[in-house]
Image (tube, rainbow, N blue to C red):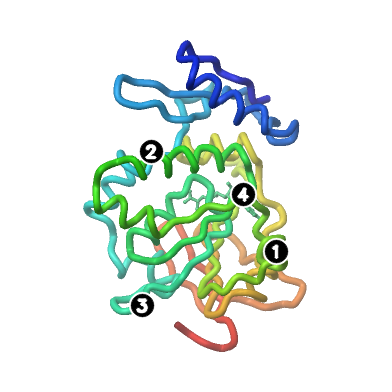
């Protein structure tokens, strides 16, 4: 169950309470108890999840891993960038159909792509919105350039794609994979996401929708040894790009390779 975490700052409290009250009963179901509220320090307040069994989870486009990636990031030759067709003179438009904590979307945006971020969990969307809001107030031209490339929509991506048929080069998917029985070093962020939203068991519906809409390609991020997403049409990836723990299954659309 997701519970509300109060703060003594009345203005902040009101803001987070309004967001919390907009969540439905289903949004508030969690595997382990969690609180939703502000993570405050003397510099800033970040909207965060507070699981009982780990530290606070929030999205931050300014500090930590994202800052490091921004400064020293893997560049256009990294597997993830090649998997969506980024190269020295091409920056496709990307619809990230499974935005989650926005890590991958941020990398694409920092490499110069316009990224439309879709996320169906309103709780995650509130964390993303808060991070975008904080980043947009940060006085840094590098950050502004990246943030301007990112837009956010709260919707189910399969529905959104089929209803709106957006003109987009690449649809990118990184659905939540079922929890492994064997204990592996899963990042705490991912554990919290799994405890909040569980596995994404409808990825084949999303992939089928993405294949109908993407102009150039659909790229699916999978654990290295995971099976491909099974489609009733029998369509299989045209190619895959591998990195040590991850595989990117690439489906070219209309026989075009980007
Ligand atoms: C594994 S996480 C993605 C992590 C993300 N790539 C990142 O870099 O932080 C999967 C996310 O996709 C979202 N998701 C899964 N299927 C979706 C769909 N059909 N529409 C919108 N969001 C979806 C889930 O709610 C979850 O937040």
Q: Is residue 227 above or below residue 86?
A: above
Whether residue 17 is visible here, answered yes or no, is: yes
Quadrant position of residue 235:
bottom right
Instruction: Identify the residue under disc 4.
Output: 154
Instruction: Identify the residue under disc 3.
Output: 90
Of all residues, the one furthest to the top in this rendering is: 8
Q: Is residue 53 above or below residue 82?
A: above
Separation (CA) of disc 1 from disc 2: 35 Å
Quadrant position of residue 162:
bottom right
Residue in the image at 72% along x and 70% along y: 231
Which of the two labelled residues, at mark 1 and mark 2, occupies the earlier sequence position?
Answer: 2
Of all residues, the one furthest to the front in this rendering is: 11
Separation (CA) of disc 4 from disc 1: 20 Å
Can you tell which mark lies on residue 134? 2
**Image quarter in which the N terminus is found:** top right
* SS of the residue under disc 4: strand
* SS of the residue under disc 3: loop
| Label 4 crowd bin: few (<14), some (14–19), many (20+), radius 10 Å | some
Q: Is residue 45 left or right of residue 232?
A: left
């Amino acid at each position: 169950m997701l519970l509300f975490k109060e703060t003594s700052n009345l203005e902040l409290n009101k803001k987070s309470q309004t967001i919390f009250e907009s969540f439905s009963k289903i949004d508030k179901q969690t595997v382990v108890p969690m609180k939703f509220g502000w993570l405050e320090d003397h510099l800033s307040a970040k909207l965060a999840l507070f699981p009982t069994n780990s530290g606070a989870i929030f999205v931050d486009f300014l500090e930590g891993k994202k800052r490091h990636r921004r400064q020293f990031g893997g560049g256009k030759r990294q597997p993830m960038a090649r998997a969506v067709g980024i190269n020295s003179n091409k920056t496709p438009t990307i619809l990230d159909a499974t935005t989650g904590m926005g890590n991958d979307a941020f990398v694409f945006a920092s490499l110069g792509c316009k990224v439309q971020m879709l996320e169906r969990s309103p709780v995650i969307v509130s964390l993303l919105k808060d991070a975008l809001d904080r980043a947009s107030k940060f006085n840094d031209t590098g950050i502004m350039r990246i943030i301007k490339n990112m837009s956010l929509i709260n919707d189910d991506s399969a529905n959104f794609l089929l209803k709106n048929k957006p003109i987009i080069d690449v649809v990118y998917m990184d659905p939540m994979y079922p929890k492994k029985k064997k204990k592996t070093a899963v990042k705490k962020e991912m554990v919290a996401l799994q405890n909040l939203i569980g596995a994404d068991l409808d990825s084949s519906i999303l992939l089928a929708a993405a294949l109908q809409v993407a102009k150039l390609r659909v790229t699916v991020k999978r654990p290295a040894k995971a099976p491909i997403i099974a489609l009733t049409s029998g369509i299989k990836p045209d190619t895959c790009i591998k990195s040590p723990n991850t595989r990117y299954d690439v489906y070219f659309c209309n026989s075009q390779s980007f």
